[in-house]
Amino acid sequence: MMWEPPRVALLWCPDWPVTAAAQSAQVPVDAPIALISNGIVHASSAAARVEGIRRGLRLREAQARHPDLVVLDYDAALDNRAFEPIITALEDLVPGVQVLRPGLCAVRVRGAAGYYGGELPAGLFLAGRADDEGAGGARVGIADGIFTADQAARRTGAQGNQRVHVVQAGHSADFLAPLGIGLLDDQHGPAGAVAIVTLLRRLGIRTLGDVAALPADDVMSRFGAPGARLHALASGRDSWPVTPRTPPQDLDVSIDFEPALDRVDQVAFGVRAMAERFILDMTAAKLVCTAIRVELDSDSGELSERVWLHPRSFTPGDVVDRVRWQLQGSGEVGLSSGITKVRVAPEAVDAIGNHESGLWGQGPDERIHHGLSRVQSMLGHGAVLMPGVGGGRTLHERQQFVAWGDRLVGERPPGQPWPGQLPTPLPGTVFSPRHPVHVFSHGGASVAVDERGALSAPPVSFSATGTQSRTLTAWAGPWPIDERWWSEDATSSWRFQAVDETGCAWLLVLDAGGWWAEARYD
């Protein structure tokens, strides 16, 4: 029996990143819009492209071409979130939707064609349903295989039946023949397709029909499996299967209170059964939850929402504790009226197998975890703190404390560039508070630094108040630290590294308050 390729309907939402960002920012989609990623145009609307604003253009140049250009940040997560309602709506009509990327999905069209009276009516119905969910002019291509259906969708119009392009069964090769060979890129073909396409162009092969006319055995022997794959695509023999996605399981739980509860202990008692059901559902799905989102609705219409983290994984008691702490206003202002609804949703999950304890337990670490969690449960979320290293220019700025179980997130993220910060290796001991010291020159005078960074004299010794003087055998610096130079509260200091006669290295700082020993290299 001859193999028949599956008939595929591919739904394409033109300029989907722009559509999603415009809807989120409440900007008209027909406005000149550019999505920016790292200072480069990632995507642009049709109105912006008329002005010559294309992908890869620098932001300054794009704004110069259109002064009224609407500039928005590109957010890949937003693309996925905004596309989810469209996928859900299509799954209600046709089962087995495969998401290729946000704004592009495929489905087997045989069942829909039989139900709606043909492939064209089925395609029009899918496009209309997507538009109802905010797709903004969805197009549909129907053909033998995903690759051909994708090319058909991109050659549709914006009006009426032109929004659906149907390539008749068995005519894929004829449809693809006049198209350019550049369509066989790494996105549609195997890895390394661009290199093969470049070589074929040098050989004078310009269209997909030219590729299909080459002997398949010769292409296989010259380019291997990747070349054979490209030859099959150009010939309309697309063997990509439509792989339906598995809809995510809804693990959110909620409870309504009628009448509203205005006491913390009442709400905590009310959510206990809900917390147990939440953890049981996670276990049944072979998952554990390492972060939850708690939402509290009040009788006056207030909403309190917060994401809570856990050093390991949540238990029912841990969920109840987080609800109680949020009601008490830990880290934010508490609600001023009774609670009408509590909702708990998993924010981050992991496979349950990654959190199983060993055959003989986990020893002291397990006891420490239970002990700290118990203290935190009794005294509150901020009662147990852990040290961490954040961002900043000085060592004291980089010292941060975070509640047990939370991640280090704050105003000074360590991943950001901090010009003037101390390079590695860092000192082993940081004095808190800093020790005041005196740094002397050969004549016994105090060493100073002028505005241009020049020393009044080389440092030869230093001492803390009431201690014996230490002779310096080596020193380096000064390195300036200028913070907030543009404001009235600007500060500046000079950093030195010095080694005394015992071989101990010190970090010395000179600022408006004098000399300080900030740290010691152990």
Image (cartoon, helix red, strand yellow):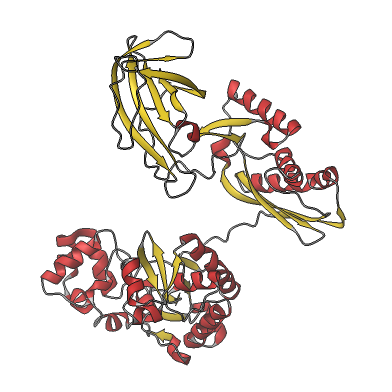
- The front one of 452 and 516 is 452
Specify the quadrant that holds the N terminus.
bottom left
Residue 212 location (% of width, % of height): 21, 75
Residue 448 in the figure: left or right of residue 81 = left
- The front one of 57 and 173 is 57
Q: Residue at x 41, y 27 (%)?
A: 509
Residue 169 location (% of width, % of height): 37, 82
- Image quadrant where residue 268 sits: top right
| 212 lies above or below 253 | below
Q: Residue at x 59, y 73 (%)?
A: 89
- The front one of 46 and 442 is 442
Residue 317 location (% of width, % of height): 73, 38
- The front one of 401 and 93 is 401
- Residue at the outermost right position: 259
Q: Residue at x 58, y 31 (%)?
A: 386
| 352 lies above or below 345 | above
Q: Residue at x 45, y 81 (%)?
A: 139
- Image quadrant where residue 3 sits: bottom left
Residue 415 visible from this viewpoint: yes
Q: How many marks?
A: 0
| 30 lies above or below 195 | below
